[in-house]
Image: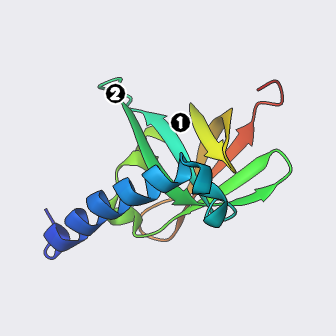
Amino acid sequence: MPAGHAPFALWNKSGNQLVRLLLVSPLHRVISGKLALITVTGRRTGHRHTFPVAYMRDGERVTIRVGLPERKIWWRNLRDGAPVRLRLAGQEHTGNAHVRGDERSSVSVDVILDPRA
């Protein structure tokens, strides 16, 4: 575990839970213009993990910039492309995600939304 990771992990876990609750509540409009929930399935475990993320949307393309990618693992499950679920502005979407960049520079995840969902 990197030095200084414990405070980051504690804040990330508790902060993420609060944001997640808000994004699934009727009050989501307060933050859902900039924050969404992404659900990623682990490649090895098959477990689903849901996290709040900042996003930008351009039509059917959603771009998620991964802050501090060296400290986060979820995006690594998307390196070879993978299906994801997104909760955007109170609505559920499915799509296919691909990673751009790596932890040495910057990381973005591009999701192309399924138009049928």
The x, y position of residue 20, in whole percent, is 45, 51
Residue 82 visible? The answer is no
Disc 1 to disc 2: CB gap under 8 Å? no
**Residues at marks 1 and 2, CA–CA distance in whole angstroms:** 17 Å
Residue at the spot 18% in from the left edge and 69% down from the top edge: 5
Residue at the spot 35% in from the left edge and 54% down from the top edge: 17
Q: Quadrant of residue 30?
A: bottom right
- Crowding around mark 2 (Cα neighbors within 10 Å: few <14, some 14 to 19, many 20+) is few
The x, y position of residue 60, in whole percent, is 82, 44
Tell whether 53 sits left or right of 62: left
The x, y position of residue 99, in whole percent, is 57, 49
Identify the residue position indicated by label 1 in the image: 80
**Farthest front residue in view:** 26
Q: Quadrant of the N terminus?
A: bottom left
Rendered position, 36 above or below 77: below
Q: Nearer the viewer, residue 40 or 43?
A: 40
Rendered position, 32 above or below 83: below
Mark in the foreground, 1 or 2: 2
Identify the residue position indicated by label 2 in the image: 47
- Crowding around mark 1 (Cα neighbors within 10 Å: few <14, some 14 to 19, many 20+) is few
- Residue type indicated by callout 2: His
Q: Nearer the viewer, residue 31 or 114?
A: 31
Q: Nearer the viewer, residue 102 or 87?
A: 87
**Farthest bottom residue in view:** 4
**SS at circle 1:** loop
Q: Quadrant of the C terminus?
A: top right
- Residue type indicated by callout 1: Asp
Specify which label sits upstream in the sequence, 1 or 2: 2
The x, y position of residue 71, in whole percent, is 31, 63
Residue at the spot 48% in from the left edge and 71% down from the top edge: 105
Q: Quadrant of residue 69?
A: bottom left
